[in-house]
Amino acid sequence: MDSVFLIGTILLAIAIVIPFYRVAYGPTVYDRILGAGVIGTKTIVLISLVGYIFNRIDMFIDIVLAYALLNFIGTVAIAKLLESKGIEKE
């Protein structure tokens, strides 16, 4: 059963690389923010799976909650900054 989670973790780690294209070459700033949010969400799931594989899910859940909060606050802060500057497109 652990091999299924290990394979899932490896595939998820590979899938995290895909949104980097949108972050690097996104046509708009909003596409880049969305790509960064997707990377953050997949990282949260990846950390949870690693915690399950190491049988320390209780410790990793605390890390995941802190990372999720930082991801959300960072996204909202960047969106507010762009709204106040009036940036629509590059």
Image (spheres, helix red, strand yellow):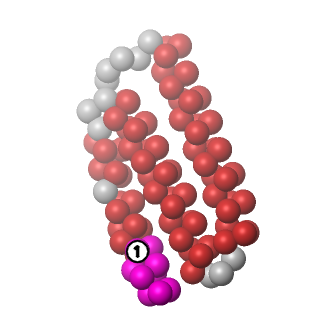
As drawn, 84 above or below 14: above
Q: Residue at x 46, y 78 (%)?
A: 5
* Point 53% across, 35% down: residue: 75
In screen coordinates, is 45 left or right of 7?
right
Tell me the residue at 32%/21% (across/down).
Answer: 89
Q: Which residues are magenta?
A: 1-9
Question: Residue at the location (41% across, 17% down)?
Answer: 87
Q: Position of residue 84 (x, y in %)?
A: 53, 13
Q: Position of residue 30 (x, y in %)?
A: 38, 30
Residue 90 location (% of width, % of height): 31, 23
Residue at disc 1, secondary structure: helix
Along the horizontal axis of the image, is 64 left or right of 58?
left
Q: Residues within 10 Å of mark 1 (few under 14, many from 20)?
A: some
State the image quarter where residue 44 is shown: bottom right
Eyeballing the image, is 46 above or below 19?
A: below
| 50 or 20, nearer to the observer | 50
Q: Left or right: 71 with respect to 41?
A: right
Q: Quadrant of residue 17?
A: bottom left
In the displayed structure, would residue 22 be above or below residue 3? above
Q: Which residue is mark 1?
A: 8
Give the percent coordinates (x, y) of residue 42.
46, 57
60 shown above or below 22: below
Asked if the magenta segment contains residue 76, the reply would be no
- Magenta span: chief secondary structure: helix
Nearer to me, 76 or 62: 62
Q: Amino acid at mark 1?
A: Gly
